[in-house]
Image (tube, rainbow, N blue to C red):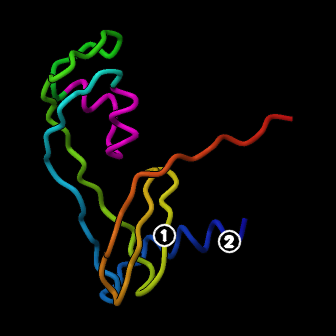
Amino acid sequence: MKHIFALCLFLLIPSRAYPAVITGGETSYRVVEGDSLLLISAKLGANMKAIARENSLDPDEDLQSGQELRVNTRKIAPRAVDDGIIVDVPGRMLYYFKAGKLALSFPVGLGMPRSR
């Protein structure tokens, strides 16, 4: 519990050494056969409901191959290191920092804990 409190406290303290980094932005995606909103959101690291809302889609209906979708992939990368990897579990993203700058970012799949 102490570690969680310390982490929360660290995240609340503004730091000039680690300013926020914004990654991604507005993009378009062309639907290919077999795509679904869930697959597209996982592939691009975007929110499935936001994609549906932005494109006036019913999440339960199939997408059409060749359909153009507007997708917002903008995220705020959690800066806590000059060099290294940060996995943002709630945001399902991996961020790699090198020489104090965001070098790469990837959407990642995270598993569920096994039930007992």
Horizontal arrangement in the rendering, residue 96 relative to residue 46 (left or right): right
Residue drawn where x is 53% and y is 67% of the image: 8
User: Disc 2 designates what residue?
Assistant: 3
Q: Which residue is at the far top? A: 61
Looking at the rendered image, the quarter that the C terminus falls into is top right
Vertical position of residue 3 compared to residue 52: above or below:
below
Amino acid type, callout 2:
His
User: Disc 1 designates what residue?
Assistant: 86
The residue stretch that appears in magenta: 36-53
Provide residue 59's location: percent of width, then percent of height: 32, 16
Badge 2 element = helix
Residue 7 quadrant: bottom right
Provide residue 9's location: percent of width, then percent of height: 52, 73
Provide residue 98's location: percent of width, then percent of height: 37, 84
Q: Which residue is at the far right? A: 116
Is residue 41 covered in magenta?
A: yes
Provide residue 79's location: percent of width, then percent of height: 38, 75
User: Nearer the N terminus, badge 1 or badge 2?
Assistant: 2
Is residue 111 covered in magenta?
A: no
Horizontal arrangement in the rendering, residue 60 relative to residue 58 (left or right): right
Which mark lies nearer to you, 1 or 2? 1
Q: Residues within 10 Å of mark 1 (few under 14, many from 20)?
A: some
Q: Main secondary structure of the magenta part?
A: helix
Marks 1 and 2 sit apart, C-alpha to C-alpha, by 17 Å
Residue drawn where x is 27% and y is 13% of the image: 58
Looking at the rendered image, the quarter that the N terminus falls into is bottom right
Residue drawn where x is 43% and y is 56% of the image: 93
Badge 1 element = strand
Q: Are marks 1 and 2 in contact (CB under 8 Å)?
A: no
Q: How many marks?
A: 2
